[in-house]
Image (cartoon, grey):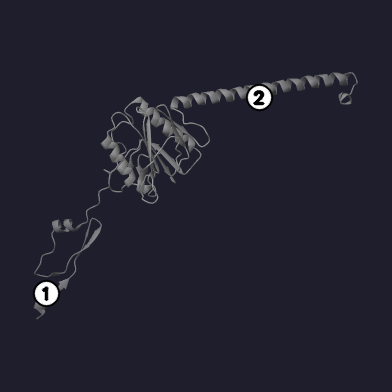
Amino acid sequence: MASLLSEYHMFNMQISYDGVNLRMKRVKVGSEMPPTILEVERMVPKPVEAVVYPESDGKPMADNTKQFRYIATLKGGFDALYKDRDDVFVAGDLLWYPVEGDAKTRYAPDVMIAFGRPPGDRGSYLQWRENGQPPNVVFEVMSPGNTVREMRRKWEAYERYGVEEYYVYDPDAGVFEGWLRDGETGKLEAIADTEGWQSPLCGVRFGLEGAHLVVTRPDGKVFLTPSEADDALEEAIRERDSVVRERDSVLREKEVAMARAEQLAERLRVLGVDPASLE
């Protein structure tokens, strides 16, 4: 009887493999062999491979100088508009990944604005690391290489992933279009007339002068091209320098006048006249 009990004695086996404790099933001594190393390796959980989110799609920012100029104008204009805000992120041609774990679903709007997110440098916009906040406002500046199918896919993606305002400008055709998310349907609905349209989120107003897109800030200033911004900066510096020179000239004249007055007062005192008695 004792030998019979020994033959069917049950036990637990615990193996530590690469820091992972594995508890094996109960086995009968003499009836089943302990697991092999290969079997143990198969039981070890495989590490989850980290998803890589590339920071470049290998495509150029713009196809021509005109498209680039308008992209830079919009990006620079919104940067200037929100330069004193710490809760607005503005980017141009930055890869946006809306779905965690999916490196294939990505978009690179020409210009995008995310409210409620801090400004600063980013290699890409990983939405789940931005408190789940998608870009609120997106701009696309078309080039001759853009196809209807491509633009349709972008519209569908922006609608699916939460963009609230979407604008498309074709500088060659002089056409500016926009879509606004409807609060009831949750869909991006076309703006019937964009001439003079004011963005609900940004407060800027859009208009066309011929084929040229004009963006006007709430304070009445217009968005400038990079070269126009440089010219305006140089003019502002010249005006500032002129004011400084004029102020310094006035101070010098005042100092000279005070020195002359003091010299005259000293002469009067030499003659025995109190300068104060002449006031």
- What is the crowding at mark 2: few (fewer than 14 residues within 10 Å), some, or many (at least 20)? few
* Residue with the mark numbered 2: 247
Question: In this orientation, which residue lies closer to the viewer: 137 or 39?
Answer: 137
Quarter of the image where the C terminus is located: top right
Three-letter code for the amino acid on which mark 2 is drawn: Arg
29 left or right of 192 in image = left
Relative height, residue 14 to residue 42 (above, below): below
- Marks 2 and 1: CB-CB under 8 Å? no
Residue 200 position, x and y percent, is 45, 43
Q: Give percent across and percent down for residue 22.
A: 21, 62
Viewer-nearest residue: 59 or 254: 59
Residue 86 image offset from top left, x and y in percent: 48, 43
Q: Which residue is mark 1?
A: 8
Q: Circle 1 — which element?
A: loop
At label 1, which amino acid type do we have?
Answer: Tyr
Q: Which class describes the residues within 10 Å of circle 1: few (<14), some (14-19), or many (20+)? A: few
